[in-house]
């Protein structure tokens, strides 16, 4: 077996992972388009409905759009940079009172999310290093480039199959199943709107579906454009 027959699949896989890593990082810089999702998913009306029903916090429905966008931004920054600051996120009521947005179980869950994101970044940087190493090795071997059509068909076919499986099983069911796999069993991750301003603010799981679609579209675009550029350069 020629070494290139192993290196090429590894390089293409790492390239695909790096494209996803870049897509995630770019979306994180714009709060995963939460301002756009706020409008598209009518999150404001959702908060006005469920905010007053919260069993632990008062007056969240009285916050305005600007404050809600700011709260999501703080959560996004905290899970990417400083999980310990999650408990310090507050909103301001009409009377000027500062109220902690998150209860302890929500803080624990978001810290678990932060640890998961650390893993995503570690995997992304590792994939980039392997991609660089395999590319250099293939260049030194002057290995011929596999037919681009085969590469595109393989990856788009795999993505289409994965999407088909998700929709056949039910996106929400798959979403909940993944939570049971990646989070510690003793840590709560499901919160009713009446118990969690975090869940209400995000209109979960609708927002996560919105983000997943954006991530997949951006991931595919970055992968396709960078693959096209790599093919041109290799030749």
Image (tube, grey):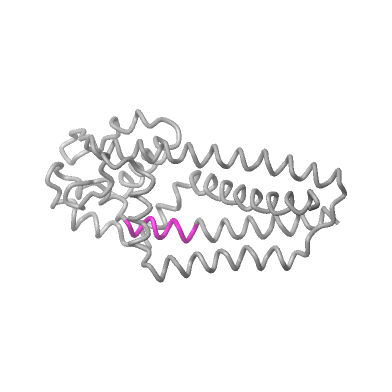
Q: Is residue 210 above or below residue 184?
A: below
Find residue 106 and report its image quarter: top left
Left-right relation of 143 to 61: right
Left-right relation of 86 to 17: left
Find residue 98 and report its image quarter: top left
Of residues 124 and 78, the one nearer the viewer is 124
Q: Residue at 29% of width from left, 30% of height from top? A: 88
As for residue 196 lying within the magenta part, the answer is: no
Left-right relation of 228 to 26: right
Counting from the top left corner in percent of width and height, residue 202 is at 32, 51
Counting from the top left corner in percent of width and height, residue 182 is at 39, 45
Counting from the top left corner in percent of width and height, residue 35 is at 40, 53
Of residues 168 and 3, the one nearer the viewer is 3
Q: Is residue 114 above or below residue 167?
A: above
Q: Quadrant of the C terminus?
A: bottom right
As for residue 212 lying within the magenta part, the answer is: yes
Q: Is residue 79 above or below residue 164?
A: above
Q: Which residues are magenta?
A: 205-214
Counting from the top left corner in percent of width and height, residue 24 is at 52, 48
Find residue 160 and report its image quarter: bottom right
Q: Residue at 62% of width from left, 47% of height from top? A: 18
Helix, strand or loop for the magenta stretch, by majority: helix
Q: Residue at 58% of width from left, 42% of height from top? A: 124
Q: Residue at 36% of width from left, 67% of height from top? A: 170
Looking at the image, which residue sits at the far front?
1
């Amino acid at each position: 077996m020629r070494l290139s027959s192993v290196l090429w699949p590894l390089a293409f896989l790492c390239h695909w992972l790096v494209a996803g890593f870049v897509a995630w990082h770019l979306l994180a810089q714009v709060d995963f388009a939460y301002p756009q999702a706020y409008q598209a998913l009518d999150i404001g009306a959702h908060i006005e409905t469920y905010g007053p029903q919260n069993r632990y916090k008062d007056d969240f429905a009285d916050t305005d759009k600007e404050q809600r966008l700011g709260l999501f931004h703080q959560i996004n920054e905290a899970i990417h940079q400083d999980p310990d600051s999650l408990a310090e996120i507050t909103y301001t009521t009409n009377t000027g009172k500062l109220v902690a947005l998150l209860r302890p179980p929500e803080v624990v869950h978001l810290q678990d999310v932060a640890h998961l994101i650390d893993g995503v970044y570690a995997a992304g940087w590792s994939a980039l290093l392997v991609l660089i190493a395999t590319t250099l090795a293939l260049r030194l071997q002057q290995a011929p480039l596999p037919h681009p059509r085969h590469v595109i068909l393989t990856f788009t076919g795999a993505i289409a199959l994965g999407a088909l499986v998700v929709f056949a099983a039910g996106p929400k069911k798959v979403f909940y199943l993944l939570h049971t796999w990646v989070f510690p069993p003793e840590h709560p991750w499901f919160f009713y709107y009446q118990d969690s301003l975090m869940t209400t603010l995000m209109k979960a799981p609708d927002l996560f579906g919105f983000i997943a679609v954006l991530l997949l579209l951006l991931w595919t675009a970055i992968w396709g454009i960078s693959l096209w550029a790599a093919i041109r350069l290799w030749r």
